[in-house]
Image (cartoon, rainbow, N blue to C red):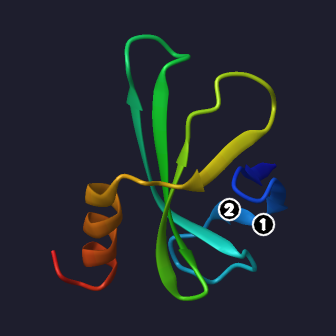
Amino acid sequence: MLINCKKTETIDIGWDPSLKKDYDYHVVSIFNCNVGNPEQHVTYLLSVHDGQPVALVDQTTNGSDCMVKETVNQEVRTAFANIYDGNY
């Protein structure tokens, strides 16, 4: 289960690089960076939602739910949008 932190709601998300499954958020790539120890991580779920690229970020450190939100990291957002649009 993934929770959208901004709205505190469950979202329908899954691994789907072909964009053929029935998800609201189709994860097409994942990037993880551990910053010291396992509890200090940044995981990006590069996704497609309603035909648009969305870079979600998770920094959940405990619990069974993954809390995601759209990243504020403009470099990641721009880079993913460029790749998605074929401008890389």
Residue at horizontal 51 percent and vertical 71 percent from the top? 17
Q: Which mark is residue 14?
A: 2
Instruction: Identify the amino acid type marked 2.
Output: Gly
Secondary structure of the residue carrying tag 1 is loop
Q: Which of marks 2 and 1 is in front?
A: 1
The spot of residue 34 in percent (x, y) is: 40, 24
Q: Which quadrant of the view contains residue 7?
A: bottom right
The spot of residue 11 in percent (x, y) is: 78, 63
Q: In this view, does 81 lie to the left or right of 41?
A: left
Instruction: Identify the amino acid type marked 1.
Output: Asp
Q: Which quadrant of the view contains residue 22?
A: bottom right
Query: Closest to the observer: 46 or 72?
Result: 72
Secondary structure of the residue carrying tag 2 is strand
Image position of 41 with respect to 13: above or below: above
Image position of 65 with respect to 74: above or below: above
The residue indicated by pointer 1 is 12
What is the CA distance from the residue labelled 2 to the residue labelled 1?
7 Å
Image position of 82 with respect to 9: above or below: below
Give the class, few, some or many, for how many residues have Cα within 10 Å of label 2's Cα (few <14, many ≥20): some
Q: In this view, does 87 lie to the left or right of 60?
A: left
Residue at horizontal 71 percent and vertical 76 percent from the top? 24
Residue at horizontal 79 percent and vertical 38 percent from the top? 65
- Mark 2 touches mark 1? (CB < 8 Å): yes
The spot of residue 30 in percent (x, y) is: 46, 51
